[in-house]
Image (spheres, helix red, strand yellow):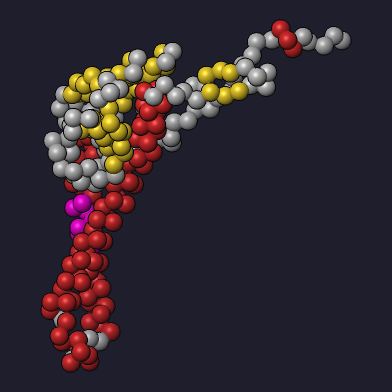
Amino acid sequence: MSQPDLKQQPDFTLSYDDLPRHCTLLREYFDDDVKITAPARKLERHDRLRIRVRAAVSAARWIGIGLLALCLIVFGGAVHHHRPLFSLGACVVAAAFGLLVFVFLCAVRCASLADAMSRALSQNTIIATNHGRLLIESDGPLGRQSSDISRDQLRELRVVRTLPVTKWSDEQDMSALQILLTDGRTVQIGVGRDLRELRWLAGTLRGFLDGARQTLTRSDGKEHVAI
């Protein structure tokens, strides 16, 4: 039985999908450029879990500050002189009251953040690179946006965990990708999306804008482009 001629077989490049888990971004490659689409979508299970975590952290922070201020203002001077009044029952009642307030704040925060994130995720955005330029088209509940940014105008791509209150977001706990320009302006895209998704988007855009697409060396010494 004759052995197959391996030299006549074409070379194949094995690659893996580097998109983060639950990512809904769509990408297309065109030689040295890329087009990434962030389509509108509804809140999913992992989004609601992320909302609950952020709401719990926010509620716990406010509860802690409130209880500390209350203890210092109301009970600060009485604790030392009336220690017997602060029995185990009083501590249990105080803990139960704090828990109820925490649940209330958490529920209110969850509803507010879910509404704002659902609105932000309803935005349709297309980001593309074109010979060193960054093109952005976005439309939806957050408004319409159209940008054509040259490489010289671009100062930094930065992923932020908390977004200041602007027309692009009614909540401070909304993540986004900020595009900082040399003239001081800031363009924000991907509002409300997962941090891992935004970090992947920022890294991909940096690579194509800087012309630093990753190259790998094969065993035969030749180079190919890894998409």
Residue 104 on the magenta span = yes
Residue 40 on the magenta span = no
Question: Image quadrant of residue 6?
Answer: top right
Q: Residue at x 29, y 44 (%)?
A: 161
Q: Is residue 4 above or below residue 123?
A: above
Q: Which residues are magenta?
A: 102-109
**Front position in the image: 184 or 127:** 184
* Observer able to see residue 137: no
- Horizontally, residue 214 falls left or right of residue 186, namely right
Q: Quadrant of the N terminus?
A: top right
Residue 17 placement (x, y as % from top left): 49, 28
- Horizontally, residue 208 falls left or right of residue 99, namely right
Residue 209 placement (x, y as % from top left): 36, 23
* Observer able to see residue 8: yes
Question: Image quadrant of residue 33?
Answer: top left
- The extreme top residue here reads 8
Question: Image quadrant of residue 86?
Answer: bottom left
